[in-house]
Amino acid sequence: MFFFNQLMLCSILLAAPLCATASQHLHHSCINKDCSALRLTVSNPPVNLWDANVISEFGDFLESLDGQNKTKVVVLASDVPAFYIAQIDLNIITPGALPGVNATEVLEQYYANLNKLSAIPVIFIGEVNGRAWGAGDEHLMRMDMRFAGPQAVFGAPEAAVGLIHVGGMQQLVGLIGPGRASEYMLSAAQVGAEEAARIGWVNSAYPTAHALRVHVDKLATRIALFHIEVIRATKASIAARGPKLKDFQDDLVRFDALAAMPFLSKNVGEILALSNNQSLQWELNNNDNVVKGLY
């Protein structure tokens, strides 16, 4: 597909350079006594860039869940201050930036991971207390539940860049409705925790990080008490009412058409220059910086 062969494949704005090491960026811990509910913590400072290493590690983690009968609930959290998950790394698709990295394979893995989040019969809960830009929000959209702390901020900068929120658009429309999805997606808005809870972007918001953690842990532990067959059947029944794979594939076609437009490479080049390759300071106010910088 054209989508996997162009520089502007990336459906999300991207941040600082990919770390060259293969260190582990995903850490596991048990929430309940038998570890049927566990927390997966993303640790890729300074902004939790969703780079090739993290994409690969997350794919391996999801694969480990497929076909197993122990894990019932997974909470995805972050230990990086002010960030949940930022964008996918632009260096993945910049020619020559990462020798030996096959950009096509990395991007295919990225979207395969998103589809697995929806399909694997495990309950995924997003525990968000930081920025969830682009890739971060796309992953949240594929989870079963989302809860926010006081530092949570949500957004998709794609419209300002010249693209669409391809991995999460259909799910977001289902959560907040077409009118609000149009408002927030077309304006590349930055949405705080309380507003996100009010409109349904997340289930609920909490005034402190501690309150958020307490609620998520209690919920995950309670769900994990029940028979795994019941959890799986409930997830499957709810998913049957949501977006279909064809909806995602249709969005990829739309994304491809935008990726071919000449304005896209100009926009991305300007963003890279203005942001000093998506620096920490830029990422703290990503969507607004893109709009102010380009327009």
Image (spheres, rainbow, N blue to C red):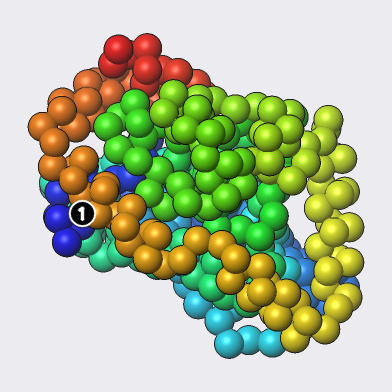
Q: Secondary structure at mark 1?
A: helix
Where residue 209 sits: x, y (%)?
A: 79, 37
Quadrant (top left, top right, bottom left, bottom right) of the C terminus: top left
User: How packed is label 1: few (under 14 Cα within 10 Å), some, or many (20 or more)?
Assistant: many
User: Amino acid under label 1?
Assistant: Phe
**Is 178 rendered above or below residue 119?**
above
Query: Measuring 60% from the left and 66% from the top, which residue is drawn there?
Result: 241
Closer to the camera, 43 or 289?
289
* Residue 15 falls left or right of residue 232: left
Where residue 284 sits: x, y (%)?
A: 51, 24
Query: Measuring 55% from the left and 58% from the top, which residue is drawn there?
Result: 142
The total number of labels drawn is 1
The residue pinned by badge 1 equals 3
* Residue 283 falls left or right of residue 128: left
Query: Measuring 21% from the left and 54% from the top, which residue is drawn there?
Result: 3
Query: Measuring 69% from the left and 79% from the top, which residue is drawn there?
Result: 232
Q: Is residue 195 visible?
A: yes
Q: Is residue 49 visible?
A: no
Q: Quadrant of residue 112?
A: bottom left
Where residue 37 sits: x, y (%)?
A: 77, 69
Quadrant (top left, top right, bottom left, bottom right) of the N terminus: bottom left
Where residue 192 sits: x, y (%)?
A: 65, 27
Closer to the camera, 147 or 240?
240
Q: Quadrant of residue 82?
A: top right
Q: Residue furthest front?
A: 179
* Residue 113 falls left or right of residue 294: right
